[in-house]
Image: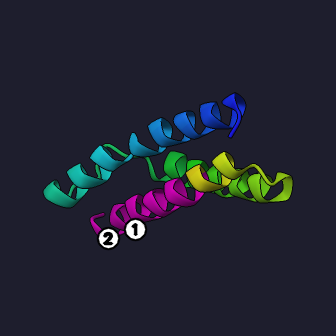
Amino acid sequence: MDFVTLLGFAAAILTTLAFVPQLIQIMKTKSTKDISLLTFSGFTVGVFLWLVYGILTNALPVIAANIVTLILAILILFYKIKYK
């Protein structure tokens, strides 16, 4: 694996894991009052588009990061709606 791909995977891991504490906090407190539904919906659509881009360009770090991030974002949106 070349340096650029490793760099992509490092970025993917760090940016994706950044959402895990937020999801854990939401699940513990059952509160999403400080999360904007509009902003997070836009973010989730953007993550989906990055996933499509990664698939079309065969960019494995982009695909891997955005699959996991999309799952985390969908869960956060689910809880945002559930705990409204």
- Residue 83: quadrant of the picture: bottom left
Please provide percent x and percent y for residue 56.
84, 58
**Which circle, 1 or 2, is nearer the viewer?**
1
Instruction: Describe the element under mark 1 as helix, strand or loop.
Output: helix
Q: Amino acid at mark 1?
A: Phe
Q: 42 and 62: which one is in front?
A: 62
Q: Is residue 67 left or right of residue 27?
A: right
Q: 9 and 28: which one is in front?
A: 9
Q: How many marks?
A: 2
Q: Amino acid at mark 2?
A: Lys
Which is the main secondary structure of the residues drawn in magenta? helix
Q: Which residue is mark 1?
A: 78
In the image as oriented, which residue stretches furthest toward the right? Answer: 56
Q: Which residue is mark 2?
A: 82
Please provide percent x and percent y for residue 51.
69, 56
Task: Please tell me the numbered disc located at residue 8.
Answer: none
Q: Residue at (21%, 49%) from the top-left corner?
A: 25
Find the distance from the CA under tag 1 to the CA under tag 2: 6 Å
Instruction: Describe the element under mark 2 as helix, strand or loop.
Output: helix
Q: Is residue 71 above or below residue 5?
A: below
Quadrant into which the C terminus falls: bottom left
Q: Residues within 10 Å of mark 2 (few under 14, many from 20)?
A: few
Quadrant into which the N terminus falls: top right
Please provide percent x and percent y for residue 74.
47, 64
The residue stretch that appears in magenta: 66-84
Q: Is residue 12 above or below residue 69?
A: above
Q: Are marks 1 and 2 in contact (CB under 8 Å)?
A: yes
